[in-house]
Amino acid sequence: MNIILLSGGSGKRLWPLSNEIRSKQFIKIFKTENGYESMVQRVFRQIRKVDRGAKVTVATSKTQVSALHNQLGGNVGISVEPCRRDTFPAIALASAYLHDIQGVSGEEAVVVCPVDPYVEDDYFAALNRLGELARSGEANLALMGIQPTYPSEKYGYIIPVDQEEISRVDTFKEKPDEDTARAYIARGALWNGGVFAYRLNYLLDKAHELIDFTDYEDLYAKYDTLEKISFDYAVVEKESSIQVMRFAGEWKDLGTWNTLTEAMEDSSIGEAVMNDSCENVHVINELDVPVLCMGLKDVVVSASSEGILVSDKEQSSYIKPYVDRIHQQVMFADKSWGSFQVVDIEEESMTVKVTLNPGHSMNYHSHERRDEVWTVISGEGRTIVDGMEQPVKAGDVVTMEAGCRHTIIADTELKVIEVQLGREISVHDKHKYELER
């Protein structure tokens, strides 16, 4: 199975655990035998369980690449969008990546789905069948229709011509009001969950019809000039040869705090205390301080270095316009080498706690407008400063003046307090170099 996972999102609906870099699919809330996993880790694990040989490609923005490598490792293809241009350009670029970079034949089927559904293994078995349906060539597009459980106003609807498991599609309907949705369901309509499959050549032909490009490299180079348009508008609504396959298994869109907490096994993650009068309360606490809840009902509490949310669960669905008013620096992020968390910001300094995974290192880099001081607080590793390598351990202090080239390499898990000193501290003040060893 060739599968493209669409990993987008601005990270605002699940503030303060999500931000511009860590969207909802990277938040670790699903309990496992060894701790917690994120949505993207859960989906990737389920795909591998159903089809160990599946070729998985994640279509995502530059800001999410480090988090994907951190959580999934290197055994996944990544189609990087230079900027956001909605789902049709993203799928066209990922399809060209499969064909031109990964060498996938144009006759093979490709399945596209969001990276963040809450589903069980039968969903991925259904994706396999959807791919087979696309490969058979009876229709140009094969969609998965989700069996509705209530007249939702949040989803678009697919109306098939009959009630068979696999049917031709009669029409599509945009997100309706509740009464209209109830009428659609009476006609056998299905939720449009954004899951579909096609033969690779079909999509590439469509892309060439709508975009002037030669190959993957050319498409990538002109990506910022492309029209912002969804796959539904660009392709699906104009295609007459479409089949839909019904799926009646568990499927949830965990897009808000209210729906996300429904999937949590524990009422709290992190340090939290609730008294006996609390009812239907969930706490997710990433801070190193306790959270105490008393007498609360139907409330979600979420705390991170980005901020603290205390909300009625139903009201939490309307968080986005309020988060839009909040402007601050990204305070934490997963990187391909580990993670960082900002712990203090002053007018001419910033203090960051850095954690490097064993065997990983930062880029060899320099800064023009700031000095840095590293204090190793645990673990062992090595630093390279202007070409000079030396071992470091807990208690060691390393200073770097502006302009000098430096990196740090973790032999074990390595934790460092980094103090940045300067009048103009910026993420853009960074120059990368090849490290000659």
Image: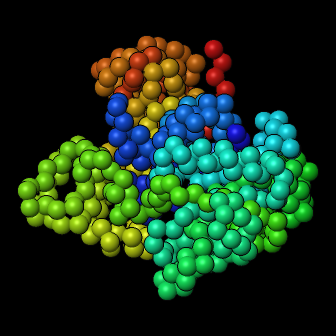
Query: In which image quadrant can residue 169 be found?
Result: bottom right
Q: Compare residues 65 and 53 and report the one nearer the observer.
A: 53
Asked if one can make out residue 151 in the rendered structure from this viewpoint, the answer is yes
Q: Position of residue 309 (x, y in %)?
A: 29, 62
Write the residue at 10% across / 64% down. 295
Residue 400 versus residue 87 in the image, above or below: above
Write the residue at 86% across / 65% down. 210
Query: In which image quadrant can residue 49 be found?
Result: top right
| Horizontal arrangement in the rendering, residue 433 relative to residue 29 (left or right) | right
| Quarter of the figure that contains the N terminus | top right
| Horizontal arrangement in the rendering, residue 380 relative to residue 283 (left or right) | right
Write the residue at 75% across / 51% down. 133
Q: Position of residue 228 (x, y in %)?
A: 72, 68
Asked if one can make out residue 396 in the rendered structure from this viewpoint, the answer is no
Residue 432 versus residue 123 in the image, above or below: above
Write the residue at 66% across / 30% down. 53
Is the image coloured rainbow, by chain, by secondary structure, or in one colour? rainbow
Q: Position of residue 40 (x, y in %)?
A: 51, 44
| Horizontal arrangement in the rendering, residue 91 relative to residue 312 (left or right) | right
| Quarter of the figure that contains the C terminus | top right
Task: Residue at the far left: name it.
Answer: 276
Q: Compare residues 158 and 300 and report the one nearer the observer.
A: 158
| Horizontal arrangement in the rendering, residue 424 relative to residue 85 (left or right) | left
Residue 247 versus residue 40 in the image, above or below: below
